[in-house]
Image (cartoon, rainbow, N blue to C red):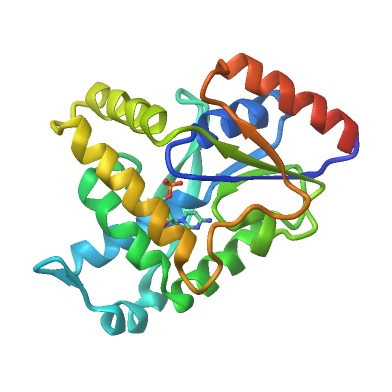
C-alpha cells in the first residue's frame, strides 16, 4: 500500500503524541515525537549550565550544537521509540516541568530549529511516518499528504498534562501546569521562526470531547482517503 507522511501539529498537551503513536502502530508507520527533540536540546542546555538563574545563554548553546546527537530507539515493551541524547536514554528526564519551562525559549533559536528540522526531514524521506510537533505541516513537510491540527481548551489540556505528570510521580500543582501550557502556547505561536500556525490545508480536530478511539478512527478514515 502507498505510504504517506502524516503531520500532526497543535497546541501543547492536546494529546498529539498519544494519537500519533496509535496511528503509527496501526499503520505500521514510524512515529517521531519532534517535541522530544527540542526537549533533548533543552535538557542538554540545563546539564551544561547554559541555563543559569533562569537565563538561557543562547550563544553558548548554539556554539555547542555539534556536540548534540539525538536518536530514537524502539522500546518493544512500551511500543514506541524512546529518545536518546548522545547515547543516553533521556525519555523520562525530558518530561519534567523544568525542561517544559525552558523548551519554548530554546525552540525560538533558528540554529536549533535548522539542525532538528534537517534531521526530521531525513527521517521522513522514505514516507510511512507520523510526526507530531508545531511546524510539521508548515515547515518540515509542507507537502505532507495528510495534515492534522489538534486543539482543545487550555483547561482540558492542563488537566490531562497534570494527571499524566502526577501518574509519573511528579510533585506539582495544577496551576503550575496550566501556567506552563499557556506560556508555551504564547511563545510557540508568536516566535519569529516557524511559529505555530494552522497550515492552509490542515484539518482541524478539537478533541476536548473526543475519546482516543474516536480520534484515531476519524484520522484513519482521512488516511484512507489520502492514500
Ligand atoms: O510536543 P511537546 O509539548 O513535547 O513540545 C515541547 C516544545 O517544543 C513546544 O512547546 C515547542 O516550544 C517546541 N517544539 C517546536 N517545534 C516542534 C515540536 C516542539 O518548537 N516541531
Estimate the x, y position of residue 218 in percent, counting from the top left.
73, 23
At 51% from the left and 52% from the top, the residue drawn is 34
Q: Can I make out residue 21 in this image?
A: yes
Quarter of the image with the C terminus is: top right
Q: Can I make out residue 86 in this image?
A: no
Q: Is residue 118 above or below residue 75?
A: below
At 75% from the left and 58% from the top, the residue drawn is 125
Front residue of this view, candidates 118 and 12: 12
Q: Is residue 121 above or below residue 97?
A: below
At 19% from the left and 62% from the top, the residue drawn is 47
Estimate the x, y position of residue 168 in percent, counting from the top left.
25, 26
Decide if residue 184 is on the left or right side of residue 52.
right
Q: Is residue 62 above or below residue 24?
A: below
Quarter of the image with the N terminus is: top right
Front residue of this view, candidates 179 and 224: 179
Front residue of this view, candidates 189 and 21: 189
Estimate the x, y position of residue 78 in percent, counting from the top left.
45, 25
At 30% from the left and 77% from the top, the residue drawn is 61
Amino acid at each position: 500500500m502507498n505510504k504517506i507522511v502524516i503531520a500532526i501539529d497543535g497546541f501543547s498537551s492536546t494529546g498529539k503524541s498519544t494519537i500519533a503513536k496509535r496511528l503509527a502502530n496501526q499503520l505500521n508507520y514510524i512515529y517521531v515525537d519532534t517535541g522530544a527533540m527540542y526537549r533533548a536540546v533543552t535538557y542538554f542546555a540545563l546539564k551544561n549550565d547554559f541555563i543559569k538563574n533562569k537565563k538561557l545563554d543562547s550563544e553558548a548553546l548554539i556554539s555547542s550544537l555539534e556536540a548534540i546527537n539525538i536518536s530514537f530507539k524502539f522500546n518493544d515493551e512500551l511500543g514506541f521509540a524512546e529518545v536518546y541524547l548522545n547515547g543516553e536514554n533521556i525519555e523520562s528526564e525530558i518530561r519534567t516541568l523544568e525542561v517544559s519551562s525552558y523548551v519554548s525559549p530554546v525552540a525560538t533559536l533558528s540554529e536549533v530549529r535548522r539542525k532538528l528540522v534537517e534531521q526530521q526531514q531525513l527521517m521522513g524521506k522514505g514516507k510511512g511516518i507520523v510526526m507530531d510537533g508545531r511546524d510539521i505541516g508548515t515547515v518540515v513537510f509542507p507537502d505532507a499528504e495528510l495534515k492534522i491540527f489538534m486543539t482543545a481548551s487550555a483547561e482540558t489540556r492542563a488537566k490531562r498534562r497534570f494527571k499524566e505528570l502526577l501518574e509519573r510521580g511528579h510533585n506539582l500543582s495544577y496551576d503550575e501546569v496550566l501556567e506552563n501550557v499557556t506560556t508555551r502556547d504564547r511563545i510557540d505561536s508568536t516566535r519569529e521562526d516557524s511559529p505555530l500556525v494552522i497550515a492552509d490545508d490542515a484539518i482541524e480536530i478539537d478533541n476536548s470531547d473526543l475519546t482516543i478511539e474516536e480520534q484515531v478512527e476519524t484520522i484513519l478514515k482521512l488516511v484512507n482517503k489520502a492514500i
